Structures are given as structure tokens and as C-alpha cells.
Image (cartoon, rainbow, N blue to C red):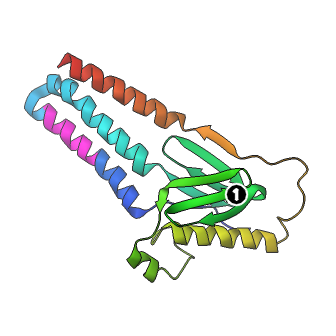
Amino acid sequence: MGPTVVYRTAVSRVLGVAAVVLAVFALAYFAATGGVREVLRSGPLVVLGAIVAWVAFGLPHVTVSDGGVTVRNVLRTVHVPWPTFAGADSTWSLTVRTTRGDIGSWAIPAASGFAARTSRDVAGQAERGVNANTVALAIGERHRALVEGGFLGRATVQEVELERSWNTGSVLALAAGAAAAVVGVLAG
């Protein structure tokens, strides 16, 4: 019925990419000034910092599709199928209300005062003006369109549950980065 839209703030994307770029420059500097020994000693700490920034800012997002809302936070992802959806709130950050409890989104903070006064258009907000207000409105519009289209509102054959999963790639990257940083510090 509608396209799948991924929402994340432009600032979060910039912070994640900037951390990775800075880590690459730092590693190049270490290699140029101290050689391999300095890269092995100090590099893991820089890489760990880049991993933390990327996992905290570059990866979290909210996806809205005909199948529901998926909230990818730092360590966990929760898929909210439409039959469990009960509403969306934008008080402090985007919160998806469900029949099984509330799901907060790390990726979509509340709007600043200026952004709240200037955001008028919900369509096309995936690339600009993303905040809790615009995403909550987009979620509400998608839900309303699915209800009006006759896709929701009927009884389900079986009970529908939230789908929760660990972001194993993020957890493993953080663990590996932390282990490498400890080894680098102890070896140095």
C-alpha cells in the first residue's frame, strides 16, 4: 500500500560518519608518527570510540512499513506489528505505544522549539526535519491509511506479539572493540 520509510535524524548520521572518519585519520596519524607499534597501542581505543559512536548514532532508526513499525535502538530491535499498535507519543522522544507496553526510540528525539514551530509537511520527512513529532505523525497516517483501506481492524487468527531481538552485530562489535582496547592499553 505504501513505501517502507526509514527515519533517522541527519545529525545522528553525521555524528556516526564523522566518528569513523576521525578514527581513520587518527590511525593514519599514529602510523605516520609512531609506526605499527603506535597503531597497535593507541589504535584500538580510537577504533572503540568510532564503534561506540557508530552504534549509538549511526545505526539506530525507525522503519515504518505496511507490516508495522520497527524501532532499532542501540542494543535491541523491536518490531511492532500493526495489530499491536496503540499510538505514538512525541513528548521526550518517539514512543510507540503497543498493547504489550511502550517502546521508546533512541534514534528519534523530540523536536526542539524551533523545529516544532517550523515542521508542517509530514510527506518527505525521511530526509529532512526528522523528529519525534514528524515521525509520530507519519506513523499515525500510515496506520490510518491501513485502517481506511480495510487492512486492519479485523480479528486476527492468532495472537500477535512484538518481535524483539538483540542487535548481535552491534554487541559483538562493541565487545571486540573493548577487548582490543584493553589489550592495546595493557600492551602499551
Q: Residue at x 18, y 38 (%)?
A: 28
Q: Nearer the viewer, residue 75 or 142?
A: 75
- Residue 184 vs 5, above or below: the answer is above
> Residue sitting at 72 percent across and 62 percent down?
86
Label 1: which secondary element: strand
Write the residue at 39% across / 45% down: 54
In the image, taking residue 161 as reference, residue 106 lies left or right, namely: left
Q: Position of residue 107 (x, y in %)?
A: 48, 56
Can residue 50 be seen?
A: yes
Q: Give the percent coordinates (x, y) of residue 84.
A: 75, 55
Question: In the image, is 13 to the left or to the right of 76?
Answer: left
Do we see residue 66 in this rendering?
no
Tell how many labels: 1
Q: Quadrant of the C terminus?
A: top left
Q: Is residue 88 magenta?
A: no
Which residue is more in the foreground, 32 or 84? 84
Residue in front for this viewpoint, 158 or 46: 158
**Does 99 sit above or below residue 176?**
below
Residue stretch rendered in magenta on the structure: 21-31
Residue 118 placement, left or right of 71: left
Q: Residues within 10 Å of mark 1 (few under 14, many from 20)?
A: some
- Could you tell me residue 176's position as x and y percent? 39, 27
Location of residue 12 in the rendering, given as x and y in whole percent from the top left corner: 39, 57
Relative vertical location of residue 113 with respect to residue 87 in this rendering, above or below: below
Secondary structure mostly seen in the magenta stretch: helix
Q: In which quadrant is the N terminus drawn?
A: bottom right
Q: Which residue is mark 1?
A: 68
Name the kind of residue labelled 1 in the image.
Gly
Q: Is residue 23 magenta?
A: yes
Q: Is residue 67 left or right of residue 25?
A: right
